Amino acid sequence: MNKRVFRDIKSNIGRYLALFILTVVALGMYVGFISGTDSAKTTFEKYLRDNNVEDGYVTLEGKIDNRIKKDVESLGIKFYNNYYVNHKSKDGSVVRIFDERTKCDLPYVKLGRLPKNSDDIFLDQIYASKKKLHLGDEITLADKKYKICGIGAFPDYAISLETATQMLADRSKFGVGMVSESVFNELDKNDIVYNYSFKYTKKYSDTEKKEKLRKMVKTLVCVSAIESYGKLDEAFEKMSNVREIKSYCGIDNNKRVSVVTQKMKSNKSMASMFVWVVIVIIAFLYVVFTKQTIQKECSVLGTLMALGIKKINILISYIIAPCVITFLGSLVGLLLGAKVLYLLPIHSLSGYYSIPDCKVNLDAAVILVAIFAPVILIAIINSLSILKALNRKPLQLIRHDLKKTRGMNKSHLNFGSFDFRFRLRVFASSMGAYVLLFIGIFLGGFLMMFGVGMSSSFDGYIEKQKNNSLCKYQYCVSDGYEIKNDAVEEATVGNFEYTDKKLKQTYSISGIGVIKNSDFFKKINRLTSDEIIISKDTAQKFVLKKDDVIKLENSATGQVDKYKIKDVVDYNLGLCFFTQQSEMNNILLKDVNYLNYYFSNKKIDIPKKYLVSKLSVEDYVSNGQVMKNAMKSMIMMFPTVAVIIYMIIMYILIKLVISQNEIGISMLKVFGFTESEIRKMYINTNTIITILFVLISLPLQYNFMVSIWPACIKTIPGYIGFVMEGKHLLIIALTGIVCYFIANVTSLNKVKKVPMVIALKNQDI
């Protein structure tokens, strides 16, 4: 019995080789993505701990008063100076130069050393890479020349966002650096931004951290002191030294840090889902092949069973070959993933996130799953299929009586030409193979659509920003700063948090308070205090609609309120909602005349000390390009894997259809049909069905892609609509058809090799 295992592999070497390659690719990607992502995640989390990353930050208008600082630290919060200045380089990019760090947010040194000398500067590794800067090179910032003494990463700037409101980082325009304390003290004091990192002195729950953060804010503005009766004199004395809070954020909501681990988890789940779908397809391919082999050898099996050979021995002999090939493919895939493919997720992450170098660490669970799980799965599925086939009497097997019922092979098709009826019978007799072919085409086309769709969606986002922007410029200013210019429109903007239960993530949403008779927001009508209007991007991101009720948390006060969605408007401002300016001021506990934002179609010069942030159409376009570049490896990988799956599955199933119909092909040869005519009946049938499957699967792939798209982009702090134009669908369809014709070339000689003697053997025909 064991001899037939090697005979089976040798006689079907092409089939087993294709399945071996498919197993290697699937398991290689699984091991590569899981181990690579896990290694990067473990390294990143250790890096944050070892380098004492902050628990949050607060940026003030000036230096904090020592007495207020003591009040804050009495809450169990330790403050660390993390001052910086923003200086421009000759090419117009901005480098944020930090004072020397010795206790908190310690930098990771990849190359060189930390700054010591008067002209030393330590730079972020991705900014240095984008600018092609190396150790020993000089960089001029604000007319001062620095020598690059070290290159590495900053734990609080894993994503180099210039402002907390930015959606994505553009490393070609913004970077981070550090100089020694003595050099920083020599910089212009007017340029210094008084930023403070803080750490909790004890471990707190998420709820306790939020409460601590709110108390800290109250203490910084002396509200806590005023609320404590009997300390009014002290409170008013401190209030004279209060510095306005420009921004603050806890580490969990800090997009510069928290998004990294979220992206890692997303990559890991997507890779796992894809790989196990491929493994299941491989298992069912083995089932079809094994059933075909049993049909060919059923008379031998019947004889063996009649001679007393146990079913378990027959079962083992038939599942050895699939299990051995799968096991070998798993081993090679494990080595490929651990040595080569693990670099794909690491390079994808390190190309956008500034994280330390990491070495792959293979988890024992990943090794066991990669080697044994596919083998066990294939053994179980094949065993169930084979035992079902063997659940017959030996005489039935000897007579090739494998049909559940008799007399069902008579055709009831009395219409159409002989060719048409023959092709229909070929399709019916190979239904199982064609079902798997459709699944393979769907999977390959889906992966192709994923890669092409990501690229086209980013292109669509960029085009939308260019042609459908609400205004050309947006300015966030310090509280109370007013612009006397008819070209601008004032507003009040606040930050809110929305937790989506389906996506299991919390997002930052901008609340925009609109003035009466607005020129930019003409669709914003009168609203009650519990009503809001949301942007179309917000509605699509979170699948919200008119009359839905949502909960929003005020980031400034921590207050959670319910709001009814009065309408959805197509204002191209990302994730945001709208209400009247007076109502927004009330929500933010501000004066009725408060404002902090301006919209304009003209560029406005605002003094640096009053300008918090500026956004332009070019910034949004740049964000889109940055996103596309960050996803470049995945955009290229998915179509490549799709082509491999297309080729292998089509090659295997085309050969399977011909093998299943060897008796019919042999009979046609006996009747005098030429090889050309036979190929038309079989190969053309495959061609027609494949083209139909490719076309039928397109709308299914598109609808499935649209349904999972929100989960695919959940780590992006905004919304990018899925764009798939007709030309992109044409590319996907043509790719599938071309792959079929390439795979089909190998089967042309298969018809020629079928001998006429098969039809003359003792067959149940």
Image (cartoon, rainbow, N blue to C red):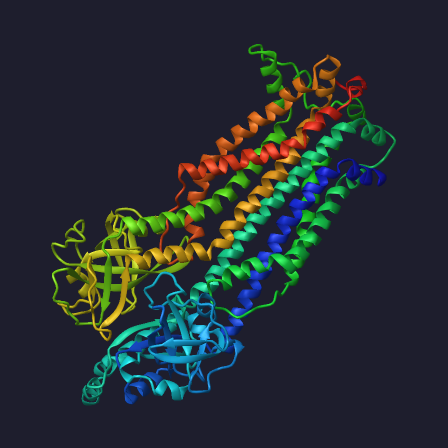
* Image quarter of the C terminus: top right
Name the residue nearer the viewer: 264 or 565. 264
Q: Is residue 226 left or right of residue 743?
A: left
Q: Is residue 307 left or right of residue 554?
A: right
Is residue 18 shown to the viewer in this render? yes
Classify 659 as above or below 265.
Answer: above
Name the residue nearer the viewer: 590 or 661. 661
Q: Residue at x 50, y 64 (%)?
A: 350
Classify 685 as above or below 330.
Answer: above
Residue 240, x across and y down, in percent = 19, 86
Residue 737, x across and y down, in percent = 55, 33
Total marks shown come to 0
The furthest residue to the top:
414
Quarter of the view holding residue 171? bottom left
Is residue 203 shown to the viewer in this render? no
Q: Is residue 274 left or right of residue 364?
A: left
* Image quarter of the N terminus: top right
Residue 36, x across and y down, in percent = 58, 61
Q: Residue at x 24, y 61 (%)?
A: 474
Classify 292 as above or below 603.
Answer: above
Name the residue nearer the viewer: 217 or 62. 62
Q: Residue at x 39, y 63 (%)?
A: 170
Residue 385, x across and y down, in percent = 69, 36
Quarter of the view holding residue 619? bottom left
Quarter of the view holding residue 749? top right
The furthest residue to the right:
307
